[in-house]
Amino acid sequence: MANVTPIFKMGSRGDPSSYGPAKQGEGETSPKLHVDKGFVNILMTSFLQYISREVSLPNDEPDSSSAPSKEQLEQEKQLLLSFKPVMQKFLYDYVDLQGSALYALQVHCYNNNFPKGMLLHFFVHFYDMEIIEEEAFLAWKEDISQEFPGKGKALFQVNQWLTWLETAEEEESEEEAD
């Protein structure tokens, strides 16, 4: 989180509920950062690492084969909700930056040996919370870039959900055409 300290006010002891965009004059963001893929990558990676640390139990060794508990999933969702305004501030209406956020998530999951269900539930949260648009998910699916590791395994984990998303988008388009 040190990378984003000048941009966001920081709460005591890392309390995410006290994070947020800095007030006027407290360390405003450069307009360049609002369209910088590298910055979005750092921002999302910082949020994901923070959430993962907070959700892990003390002395918890990451086990990619076991699913998280309901309590851990709920805590993860609440932490993500606390960062939602900041994510939306930088990602809203920028499909290419939303793609960068998805790649940051992919790499985060890769670096943690793809914990069971992590990528899928983050995809669902990002979609349900309107942080990332359908178009960005589908563009990520079709992108064959080798720049970010773990794409094959990531696609395998979320392919069924992406198929649902494509189908839902097609049905919505057909309804609008009628």
Image: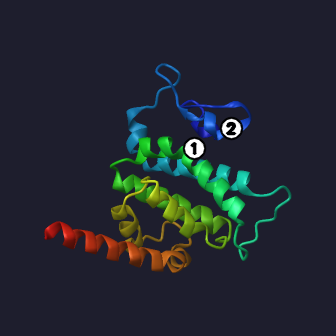
Instruction: State left or right for residue 27 relative to residue 169.
Output: right
Against 18, is 134 above or below? Answer: below
User: What residue is rendered at 48% in x and 66% in y?
Assistant: 147
Which colouring convention does the figure follow? rainbow
Q: Position of residue 72 (x, y in %)?
A: 70, 60
Characterize the local packing of mark 2: few (<14), some (14-19) or many (20 or more) Cα atoms within 10 angstroms.
Answer: few
In the image shown, does 108 or 53 lie closer to the viewer?
53
Q: Residue furthest top?
A: 25
Against 10, is 93 above or below? Answer: below
Instruction: State left or right for residue 46 relative to residue 40.
Output: right
In the image shown, does 46 or 127 lie closer to the viewer?
127
Label of residue 137 in the image: none
User: What residue is rendered at 33% in x and 72% in y?
Assistant: 168
Q: Residue furthest left?
A: 178
The quarter of the picture where residue 77 lies is bottom right
**Mark found first going from the N terminus, 2 or 1:** 2
User: What residue is rendered at 42% in x and 41% in y?
Assistant: 89
Of the residues shown, which amino acid type is indicated by label 2? Asp
Secondary element type, mark 2: loop
Name the residue beneath numbered marker 2: 15
Instruction: State left or right for residue 161 relative to residue 78.
Output: left
Q: Position of residue 133 (x, y in %)?
A: 37, 58
Which quadrant would the C terminus be assigned to in this image?
A: bottom left
Secondary element type, mark 1: helix
Which quadrant would the N terminus be assigned to in this image?
A: top right
The quarter of the picture where residue 119 lies is bottom right
Name the residue beneath numbered marker 1: 82
How much space separates mark 2 and mark 1, taking CA atoms? 10 Å
Of the residues shown, which amino acid type is indicated by label 1? Ser
